[in-house]
Image (cartoon, grey):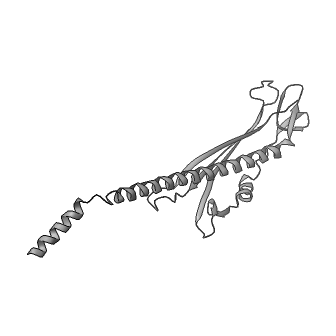
Amino acid sequence: MRRVGERMQKIRQILREKRGSSFPLIVAVTLCLVIIITGISEYFRLMIIAQGVRDAVQDAVISTVNDNYDDVYHGVREGYSGGYQPVADDFEESLDYGDIYNRLDTILGLEQSGGYHVKTISDGKMEFRIWDLDVDIRNAPIGTGDTASSRFKVDCTIMLEVPVSFGGKLLPSMKIRIKTSGGYTPKF
């Protein structure tokens, strides 16, 4: 009985002792900081991928605008320009939509898989994928003289999906629509 009493005394003394009592709190704070830093780094990874894809789409749109440059009618005197070719005594609209997907595949290193263009990382996992490309070319009208609408402009939208690697499969992938524009305005 005496041994049991001594053991209970030792247990009480250990419980009353304050040394090392902050250890669980330090572990909890460290784990919270690791989770926060991991979340912030995942957010930056997603933003860097989205910015890179947006820049690549912008580059492809600008290339499409440049492809149309050779057909742009220079209305220097009238102050407008558009994608037209002379036909007999009139002008006919001449637009080149280019191959934006092919340019994106080359710039970003994408592979076509089904209806998607996919970027994979070394272990075969998807880094991101794009689809639903929509290109809208707005040609400047001939003969309006309106400087506000006298710009050859290409608008492009595309869907981007990036899987989120924070929290395993708990979080859904980031899906955003990226919109870019490019245009041609004559300088002289």
Looking at the picture, how far across and down is residue 21, in whole percent? 31, 58
Quarter of the figure that contains the N terminus: bottom left
The vertical placement of 2 against 142, above or below, is below
- How many marks do you count on the picture? 0
Q: What residue sits 54% from the left and 58% below the top?
A: 163
Vertically, is 115 above or below 69?
below
The image quadrant of residue 142 is top right
**Residue sitting farthest toward the right:** 88
- The image position of residue 182, as x and y in percent, is 74, 40
Q: Is residue 176 above or below residue 128?
A: above
Looking at the image, which residue is at 52% across and 60% down? Answer: 165
User: Which residue sits at x=88%, y=33%?
Assistant: 74
The location of residue 40, given as percent across then percent down, is 52, 51
Of residue 166 and residue 133, the one placed in the foreground of this image is 166
Question: Which one is nearer the viewer's eye here, 37 or 149?
Answer: 37
Left or right of 146 in this view: 122: left
Q: In the rendered image, which quarter contains the C terminus? A: top right
- 109 sits left or right of 114 in the view: right
- Which residue corresponds to the image point at 40% horizontal and 54% vertical from the top-left? 29
In this rendered view, identify the residue nearer to me: 53 or 72.
Answer: 53
Residues 26 and 55: in front is 26
Q: Quadrant of residue 101?
A: bottom right
Q: Residue furthest left?
A: 1
